[in-house]
Image (cartoon, grey):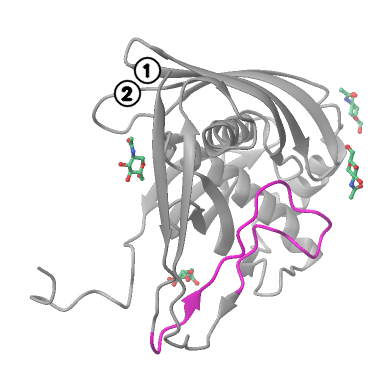
Amino acid sequence: MDWTLLILLVVPTVVHGNPTVTVRTGSGPPVGSDQHPNSVPLSEETQTTTEVREVVVEEVMMTGVLNPSHYPARRAATVVQHYLNTRYGSPYRWIFLSKVHSGSAEDVAEMRKYQLELTMQEIISNVSGQCSAELLFPGGEGQSAPQVQASCEGLLQSNTTAQEEAFYQQHRASNNMVSGNDIPDSYGHMEPNMKPFWHLGGVASSFIMLKESNESTLYNMAQVANFTQLETEKDQLRVNYHVLLHEMISQEIIHWKLLVTWSPEQGVQVLQTELQPKCHNCEAPPNTTN
Ligand SMILES: *[C@@H]1O[C@H](CO)[C@@H](O)[C@H](O)[C@H]1NC(C)=O
Ligand SMILES: *[C@@H]1O[C@H](CO)[C@@H](O)[C@H](O)[C@H]1NC(C)=O
Ligand SMILES: *[C@@H]1O[C@H](CO)[C@@H](O)[C@H](O)[C@H]1NC(C)=O
Ligand SMILES: *[C@@H]1O[C@H](CO)[C@@H](O)[C@H](O)[C@H]1NC(C)=O
């Protein structure tokens, strides 16, 4: 058995004169339509220089039976969430981790293999289901996506055919392109007609988050900064998204641009992804870093 001492140092950054992004961290599915735990309040205020340092020392067991409420199990379970969204997500189907029941991990040929029993929740219909999942995190150099297998019961019960078809028919004709920004806004609100685009942005973000995840990350979509619908091509709705992902371990907000297509027949596909530079306005002047 193999124990690792994990030390997280949380130091809120202090920014003068720039809009700062603060994030209410929270996991689990958004509850209700107004208060989303993964919403990002954006504040224009300049933060004062009061600096809070918080040191979290957590002793984490990396292999063997895992504590369901500790990070290793939750991180792996969140990867399963992203995987399920890439498989089954739509503007009317968005899956979140509800509960980790049990988990274990073992080292297998330079990889770490997780076995998990989970409750997942589809938050639009509020249907939940039990899932058994197996995950492999490739070891070694270079980032390659975790491999996931999952089987779930009851999760896909909701019949979204009618809603999806109506949304598709409403938006496939290119005479009324939709766009939007700040979804949800600083207060966690959004217009009802923006919701399917928010869900689609969240599902599309899971394609990135699945690929980018490793054993040390915990990704969450924080906000759709903006989206622009493009002309429908080959019967696929096409939408450009600029999304803000929150990596909860490093507390980084990461910007990605995505070209997403969707139709009821073909499902969600992410055709292009582009990681945006870390910081647009606060590049360090030359020669000030060592
Ligand atoms: C969603 O379902 C759960 C049980 O699966 C229930 O506890 C919860 O109240 C429901 N939430 C809403 C908003 O209906
Ligand atoms: C879902 O509902 C549609 C009609 O809205 C129906 O045609 C279809 O057969 C239903 N699918 C399932 C799996 O129940
Ligand atoms: C996990 O991903 C993060 C962010 O991309 C990266 O900084 C880190 O080195 C990766 N860790 C491992 C063990 O691959
Ligand atoms: C979308 O949001 C990003 C991040 O806030 C911004 O840099 C970009 O200019 C916006 N794009 C559009 C088309 O509004």
Image coordinates for residue 205, horizontal then vertical, percent:
54, 46
Amino acid on which disc 1 is placed: Met
Of 195 and 1, nearer the camera is: 1
Query: Within 8 Å: ligand 3 and the Cβ of disc 2?
Result: no
Quadrant (top left, top right, bottom left, bottom right) of the N terminus: top left
Within 10 Å of disc 2 (Cα), the crowding (few <14, some 14-19, many 20+) is some
Above or below, 210 against 41 in this view is above
Image quarter where ligand 1 lies = top right
Q: Residue at x 52, y 57 (%)?
A: 241
User: Where in the figure is residue 3, as x and y percent of width and height?
Assistant: 41, 28
Q: Secondary structure at mark 2?
A: loop
Q: Which mark is residue 139?
A: 2
The foreground one among 174 and 211 is 211
User: With 106 as the anchor, is 88 left or right in this view?
Assistant: right
Which residue is denoted by mark 1 in the rendering? 111
Instruction: Give the extent of the magenta segment.
Output: 16-41
Left or right, 17 with reference to 148: left
For marks 2 and 1 on the same chain, the one whose residue lies earlier in the sequence: 1
> From the viewer's perspective, is residue 52 above or below residue 79?
below
On the picture, is 10 further left or further right than 80? left
Q: Amino acid at mark 2?
A: Gly
Mark 2 and mark 1 in contact? Answer it, CB < 8 Å: yes
Q: Tell me residue 89's x, y (percent).
A: 67, 36
